[in-house]
Image (spheres, rainbow, N blue to C red):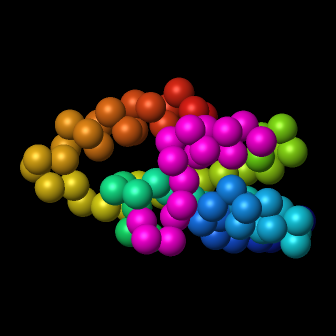
Amino acid sequence: MLKPELILPGGSPEKMDFAYMYGGDTVYMGITGFSMRSRINDFSPEQLEASVKKAHEMGKKVYVTTNIFPHNSKIEAFRRHIKWLSKVK
């Protein structure tokens, strides 16, 4: 029997901690510039990387959102971001 997965927003390191504290299995987050919720997501690249590591140490999952269509002038930055995310795992 499949168990439902509780996915909650983790808009900042503090919000991520609360999401897991209150039973979340997974959080979703992004960083400014590459997320539709960029005004709500309060992660620097360094904070995002540390938060993903912390979540994995807790046995939790993280989904990093990149739900934008970059303008032509931002495509190369978006490619670098995706390459960086692949290293964060």
Q: Residue at x 88, y 72 (%)?
A: 22
In which quadrant will I find the N terminus? bottom right
Number of callouts:
0
Q: Using the rendered image of the protein, determine whether residue 5 is visible from the camera's viewpoint.
A: no
Q: Position of residue 56 (x, y in %)?
A: 77, 40
Q: Position of residue 30 (x, y in %)?
A: 50, 56
Q: Position of residue 19 (x, y in %)?
A: 78, 68
Please give left or right for residue 27 compared with residue 31 in the image. right
Q: Nearer the viewer, residue 5 or 75?
A: 75
Q: Residue at x 73, y 62 (%)?
A: 14
Q: Using the rendered image of the protein, determine whether residue 72 is visible from the camera's viewpoint.
A: yes
7, above or below 49, in the image:
below
Q: Quadrant of residue 2?
A: bottom right
7, above or below 31, in the image:
below
Q: Residue at x 49, y 37 (%)?
A: 85
Direction top: furthest residue: 87
User: Is residue 71 rendered magenta in the image?
Assistant: no
Q: Quadrant of residue 49?
A: top right
Q: Quadrant of residue 10?
A: bottom right
Please give left or right for residue 42 compared with residue 80 in the image. right
66, above or below 37, in the image:
above
In which quadrant will I find the C terminus? top right
Q: What is the magenta range?
A: 38-54
Direction left: furthest residue: 72
Q: Position of residue 11 (x, y in %)?
A: 60, 65
